[in-house]
């Protein structure tokens, strides 16, 4: 949401953006509240995956509760002052960074749980998740610091808007854009592609159907993240290209800037959809568990995820080990009985 043009020039875009933001608030705020309440109230034994879902819902909820202010400011004007503008954009950016990091961490955790179950079990026993989450949130707030000096209020015909960033140089703008694009999108998305690329063949081979469903659920969260964030990041990439070519090809830079401005409002609104779509995915996943669970509901989904992640992989390997051990014992008994029969024959 940087360097947005005055809202008067984009009446159609503002209407669509306000509709998207309003729908995101109506669906996402109650949905994430339900997720948080369900996990805290009904899930006592929480797996790593469920803890990450809890933090993701909290981050998304913080973003969504600001939407009424944004809708009002888009439709009317920003009346809450510069300090509130900076604080709110900083908080939203930090929560969005944390959401991206949490989705990435969920995918890595699922990858380790499926491919390396013993390593996952050791990691769980060491209780390292709290330290990882603390580092994750600190990193999210750290990467959001550039918002504080660059976010500004700008007035047009007496109407103020908290939609702009002002940079002291092209270098500063380039660094900020690269930071947001690489750390907030390209690097996490690359990790996601690697994790699920490696898991693709394993998902259909999983012995436990419930474990397969948990992995597919997290994969659907990743797909939703990619769909919602890609347009905004394309806008950032266009801005980087403009900075690179505006000195040598002014006409091309102007055309690209026109494209970026056209997609700014819709792309920015789609980012907020990513904060509201996850509870919808959980609801659909809870419905799909009717085939295997008598007691349906979203709390049963999270309980089920806790019971199958990440220890299930260990149980599956242990089952194989026990079966091999039983087979070995059986073969030993058969060998002993044959030896005894041979001795009797000789006697």
Image (cartoon, grey):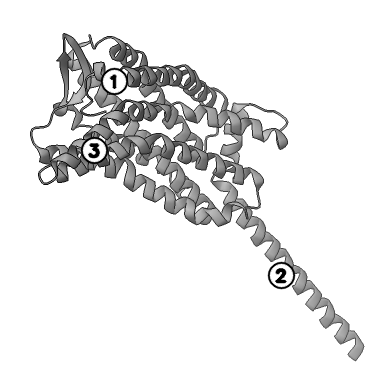
How far apart, in angstroms, are the residues tagged by discs 1 and 2?
74 Å
Residue 345: x and y, percent?
Answer: 91, 88
How far apart, in angstroms, are the residues tagged by discs 2 and 3?
69 Å
Q: Residue at x 46, y 22 (%)?
A: 28
User: For the view shown, which residue lies furthest in the left direction?
Assistant: 168
Vertical arrangement, residue 6 with respect to residue 46, above or below = above
Residue 175: x and y, percent?
Answer: 17, 41
Q: Secondary structure at mark 3?
A: helix
The quadrant of the picture occupied by the N terminus is top left
From the viewer's perspective, tell me whether residue 83 is left or right of residue 234. Answer: left
In the foreground, 169 or 288:
169
The quadrant of the picture occupied by the C terminus is bottom right
User: For the view shown, which residue lies furthest in the front direction?
Assistant: 251
> What residue is pinned by disc 1?
10
Q: Secondary structure at mark 2?
A: helix
In the foreground, 99 or 300:
99
> What residue is pinned by disc 2?
328
């Amino acid at each position: 949401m940087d360097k947005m043009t005055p809202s008067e020039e984009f009446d159609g875009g503002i209407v669509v953006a306000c509709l998207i933001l309003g729908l995101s608030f109506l669906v996402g705020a109650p949905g994430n509240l339900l997720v948080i309440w369900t996990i805290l109230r009904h899930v006592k034994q929480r797996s790593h995956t469920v803890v990450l879902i809890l933090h993701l819902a909290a981050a998304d909820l913080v973003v969504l509760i600001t939407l009424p202010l944004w809708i009002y400011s888009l439709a009317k004007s920003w009346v809450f002052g510069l300090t509130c503008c900076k604080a709110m954009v900083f908080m939203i950016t930090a929560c969005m960074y944390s959401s991206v990091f949490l989705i990435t961490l969920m995918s890595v955790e699922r990858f380790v749980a499926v491919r390396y179950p013993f390593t996952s079990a050791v990691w769980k026993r060491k209780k390292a998740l709290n330290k990882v989450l603390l580092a994750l949130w600190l990193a999210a707030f750290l990467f959001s610091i550039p918002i504080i000096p660059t976010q500004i209020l700008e007035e047009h015909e007496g109407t103020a808007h908290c939609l702009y960033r002002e940079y002291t140089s092209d270098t500063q703008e380039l660094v900020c854009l690269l930071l947001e694009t690489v750390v907030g999108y390209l690097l996490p998305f690359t990790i996601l592609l690697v994790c699920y690329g490696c898991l693709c063949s394993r998902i259909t081979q999983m012995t436990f159907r419930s474990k397969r469903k948990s992995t597919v659920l997290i994969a659907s969260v990743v797909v939703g993240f990619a769909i919602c964030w890609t347009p905004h990041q394309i806008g950032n990439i266009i801005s980087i290209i403009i900075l690179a070519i505006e000195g040598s090809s002014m006409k091309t830079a102007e055309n690209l800037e026109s494209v970026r401005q056209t997609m700014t409002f819709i792309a920015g609104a789609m980012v907020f959809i990513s904060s509201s779509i996850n509870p919808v995915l959980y609801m659909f996943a809870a419905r799909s568990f009717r085939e295997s669970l008598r007691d349906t509901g979203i709390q049963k989904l999270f309980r089920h995820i806790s019971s199958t992640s990440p220890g299930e992989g260990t149980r599956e390997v242990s089952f194989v080990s026990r079966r091999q051990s039983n087979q070995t014992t059986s073969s030993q008994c058969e060998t002993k009985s044959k030896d005894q029969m041979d001795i009797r024959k000789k006697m």
